[in-house]
Image (spheres, grey):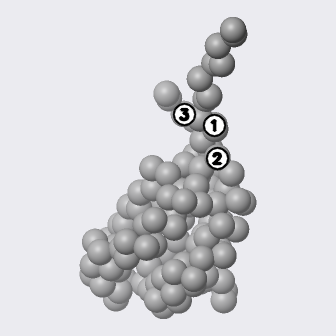
Amino acid sequence: MPSTPPSTPPQQHRVCFLLRVKTEHLVEYKARHAQVWPDMLQALRETGWHNYSLFLGEDGLLVGYFETPDLLAAQTGMQQREVNARWQAEMAPFFEALDGKAPDQGFFQLEEVFHLD
């Protein structure tokens, strides 16, 4: 009987993005992210957000990085979660220039130009 080869995990795409946190909210922004709601963390994992990190500069520049098999599916999946609507509503006032978009939809995505594995 032929053996079934082990399944390979889906290819992960690296996503890097920028946002800008209002400088008067830096301390509170960091405090909120030190205690992200457990149901928000679970929703991110379940919808394909992996290896997710945020880096914040003193000037408010926020650099985010995560890996996902499908960015559109990951974003769409989170849009369908009630916990995400609550989280985005709470986080929106912390950011500059979202033009009415939620933070998870209003970020500026960067192009990957180099990767060393």
Residue located beneath label 2 in the image: 69
Disc 1 is placed on an element classified as loop
Residue 86 x %, y %:
51, 87
Which numbered dot is residue 115?
A: 3
> How crowded is the residue under tag 2: few (<14 C-alpha within 10 Å), some, or many (20+)?
some
Q: Residue at x 68, y 51 (%)?
A: 70
Q: Residue at x 59, y 60 (%)?
A: 47
Q: CA distance from mark 3 to mark 1?
A: 15 Å
CB-based contact (under 8 Å), mark 3 and mark 1: no
Q: Is residue 57 left or right of residue 27?
A: right
Q: How many numbered circles does the render carry?
A: 3
Q: Is residue 96 left or right of residue 102?
A: left
Q: Type of residue at label 1?
A: Gln
Disc 2 is placed on an element classified as loop
Query: In front of the other: label 3 or label 1?
Result: 1
Q: Quadrant of the N terminus?
A: top right
Q: Type of residue at label 3?
A: His
Residue 8 x %, y %:
61, 29
Q: Residue at x 64, y 13 (%)?
A: 3
